Image (cartoon, rainbow, N blue to C red):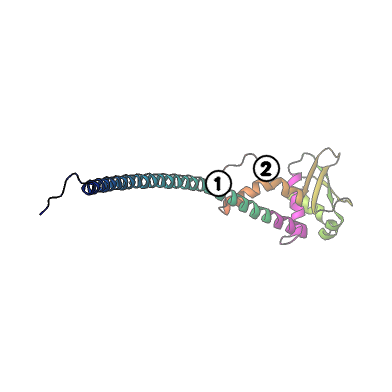
Amino acid sequence: MATPNQNSPELLREEILADARRQSEEIIRRAQQEAEALLTKANGEADKALRERLDRAHAEAARRMELILATVPVEAGRLRLARVEALLESVHEEIRWRLAARDGFDYRKTLITLAAEAMAQMPGSAFVIKLSAADCAAAGDGLAEGMARHVGRSPLNITISNDATLTEGGVIIEDADGRQVWDNRLLARLERLWPELRRQIAVQTTLVAESKPAGGVA
């Protein structure tokens, strides 16, 4: 049997092809390894980038939530204050309406009390009580005598004057010389007393915490 010639072209070709296949396979294997390593690295970097983006998003969401929560007490306080002011304004308007309509109280007695209260704090013994025409008609006779009794000092000379320029209810008190004037008309008195009245209403209805008034009532 003939032995193959190791130097034959056919054998050399086979060896070259086998070596080429081995090199190709090695190149492919290394390429696959490198590709897998790159893919793993890329996936890791992508995961890291994703985690970082998620962390930043969570941090931003937390920051915005803190800002929102921080504004809640301020906004709640603002809304409460606006509600309190609206309620107090409605009370103020209701009082004004009742005073203008003479609703719910003895109007003649109120005129006597308003005038007597002012005269009790004014020196002198002669006074002019100015009333609107409507109040003069509504009060009737004996008004001056009733006022004098309520002042608590005598003798007093009280003149009731029908003043056509007055349209609001209540009294304006002047001394005989016109040097002292006390405006005790109902609405004027309400406006003087309202700052303290609104404070008392708010405190008594627990709308606001009690605090001392900044000053006295005129």
Residue indicated by mark 1: 74
x and y percentages locating residue 151 in the rendered image: 74, 47
Q: Which mark is residue 114?
A: none
x and y percentages locating residue 17 in the rendered image: 26, 48
Specify the amino acid type for callout 1.
Val
Q: Residues within 10 Å of mark 1 (few under 14, many from 20)?
A: few
Which residue is painted at 57% across and 54% down in the image? 205
Residue indicated by mark 2: 217
Mark 2, secondary structure of its residue: loop
Vertical relation: 144 (above or below) 121: below
Vertical relation: 176 (above or below) 166: above
Q: 120 or 69, which lies in front? A: 69
Q: Residues within 10 Å of mark 2 (few under 14, many from 20)?
A: few
Residue most extreme to the right: 164
Residue most extreme to the left: 1
Name the image quarter holding the N terminus: bottom left
Q: Is residue 205 left or right of residue 57?
A: right
Residue 182 placement: quadrant: top right
x and y percentages locating residue 114 in the rendered image: 75, 50
Q: Is residue 13 magenta?
A: no
Q: Which numbered disc, 2 or 1, marks the residue that appears first in the sequence?
A: 1
Q: Mark 2, mark 1: which one is toward the viewer?
A: 1
